[in-house]
Image: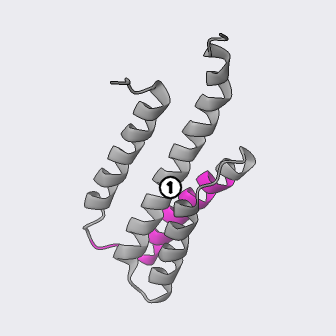
């Protein structure tokens, strides 16, 4: 059985945070909450873009957040924005860890 790499463990940790933030978003949210969450997600996604490692699920979550906010469903909009932020941060972690990981490869 293959053990998990540090990068895989980091991504799993970030996804655990995603699940936690989803359950924490059960409280009633406002438009201000949405704008704050969306700004954080958008900033993280732009950083992932700079690293050339944007994920399609992040874009989908951002679009879902925008659509929910347009409908006035701020609870769903905040949850989707937080999901997008967690995904963007996971992609940033992946990009930065893999940037250095190749140096540890064994040449055979």
Q: Nearer the viewer, residue 103 or 106?
A: 106
Q: Main secondary structure of the magenta part?
A: helix
Q: Where's residue 36, x and y in %?
A: 51, 63
Quarter of the figure with the C terminus: top right
Q: Which residues are magenta?
A: 28-46
Q: Where's residue 54, x and y in %?
A: 64, 54
Residue at 49% x, 60% y is: 84
Quarter of the figure with the N terminus: top left
Residue at 29% x, 51% y is: 20
* Mark 1 burial class by Cα count in 10 Å: few <14, some 14-19, many 20+: many
Residue 6's place in the image compared with 94, above or below, is above
Residue 95's place in the image compared with 102, above or below, is below
Residue at the front extreme of this rendering: 108
Q: Nearer the viewer, residue 80 or 57?
A: 57
Residue, disc 1: 85
Residue 28's place in the image compared with 106, above or below, is below
Residue at 44% x, 89% y is: 71
Query: Which SS class for mark 1?
Result: helix
Q: Quadrant of residue 8?
A: top left
Q: Where's residue 88, x and y in %?
A: 55, 52
Q: Is residue 31 magenta?
A: yes
Q: Quadrant of residue 40?
A: bottom right
Q: Is 14 positioned to the left or the right of 60 in the image?
A: left
Residue at the bottom extreme of this rendering: 71
């Amino acid at each position: 059985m293959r053990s998990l790499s540090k990068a895989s463990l980091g991504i799993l940790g970030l996804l655990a945070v995603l699940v936690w933030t989803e359950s924490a978003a059960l409280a009633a949210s406002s438009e201000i909450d949405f704008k704050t969450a969306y700004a954080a997600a958008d900033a993280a996604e732009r950083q992932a873009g700079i690293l050339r490692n944007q994920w399609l699920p992040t874009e989908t979550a951002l679009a879902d957040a925008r659509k929910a906010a347009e409908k006035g469903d701020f609870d769903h909009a905040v949850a989707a924005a937080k999901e997008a932020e967690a995904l963007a941060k996971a992609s940033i972690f992946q990009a930065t860890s893999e940037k250095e990981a190749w140096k540890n490869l064994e040449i055979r």
